[in-house]
Amino acid sequence: MVTIRQGMMKDCSDLLEVYQGTRWFYRTRVGGYTTVEQVKDEHKGAAFERWGWLVAEEKGQVIGEIVFRAEKNPVSGRVGIIRNLDVDVRNQKATIGTMLTRAAEEVLRKKKVVRVVATTPPAAYNYWMKVQYFARGNIMDISISPTKIPKIRASKVKMVSLKEVTKLPTSMRFSHIAYPGSLAELAADIIDEEHTGKLLEFYSAEHLFGVGAIAKVDAKTAIFVVDVTKHGLNEADIVISKTAGHALRWKVKKVKSTIPKDNLNIYTSFAKWSSELSTDIPVTRLL
């Protein structure tokens, strides 16, 4: 019999075996997962503090997990985000993934979430269709040389660099024009020192209207995510310019972001970004 329960750090030993079957291609770890400590790192720090974590256990062995959370959206209400769903490859034809997904949805429903978003590679899209998650929109990968980002001056705008942050700032726990979850993910990586980076807040007349996170990935590349409130849409170019422009200090050749295709015009309205359609598919289910 399979039991769905709250995940615990001791489960990471079993999850190592799960990950070795499901994450052999994992981009940020050369050679994949090889130690329990690597799995534990996925389940602690600012990057994990607000995520829900459920595991599937059978005969005393953890054979799957789902990680998820709720995020505020100023237009559509609270949105649920499924960050990852991993099921032991020997059990993927069973209903374990469905059980974990439905259990996570029940938790999110109690948090008054109205829709849930997940991001899937094409190979896993059939699973998400089977559990009533369907493609909605597209994701774009954009990039530009920092030297080609226009400097937009705004005398009434104050930019604040957040320093010595140990927890995810409240201002970065939402999504509006950013892809759901992406701002919080990058901000948490910076806080946990996975990357060197900056967290920025933007104010006009003492009112917060935008936020940004930017991190140096390597000697040639930086990545960033920005977002604005409903009242900050007209100043989105300022937030983008000043956040992405921070990459000049690191002398990188390229600064990149991943955004909803519907919001591409916000970026291209003031700069010539290179863009291409992401192979990942955003899927959504209404609760």
Image (cartoon, helix red, strand yellow):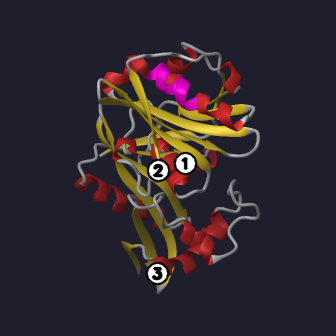
User: Residue 145's x, y, as percent?
Assistant: 71, 26
| Residue pointed to by mark 2 | 130
Dot 1 surroundings within 10 Å: few (below 14), some, or many (20 or more)?
A: few
The single residue placed furthest to the top in the displayed view is 269
User: Residue 6's x, y, as percent?
Assistant: 37, 72
Q: Amino acid at mark 3?
A: Glu
User: Residue 15's x, y, as percent?
Assistant: 56, 74
Q: Nearer the viewer, mark 1 or mark 3?
A: 3
Q: Nearer the viewer, residue 267 or 282?
A: 267
Q: Is residue 63 magenta?
A: no
First of labels 1, 3 by sequence position? 3
The answer to whether any part of residue 98 appears in the image is no
Labels 1 and 2 touching (C-beta < 8 A): yes
194 is higher (above) or lower (below) than 159 = below
Q: Quadrant of the N terminus?
A: bottom left
Q: Secondary structure at mark 2?
A: helix
Q: CA distance from mark 1 to mark 3?
A: 25 Å
Q: Amino acid at mark 2?
A: Lys
Dot 2 surroundings within 10 Å: few (below 14), some, or many (20 or more)?
A: few
First of labels 3, 2 by sequence position? 3
Q: Nearer the viewer, mark 3 or mark 2?
A: 3
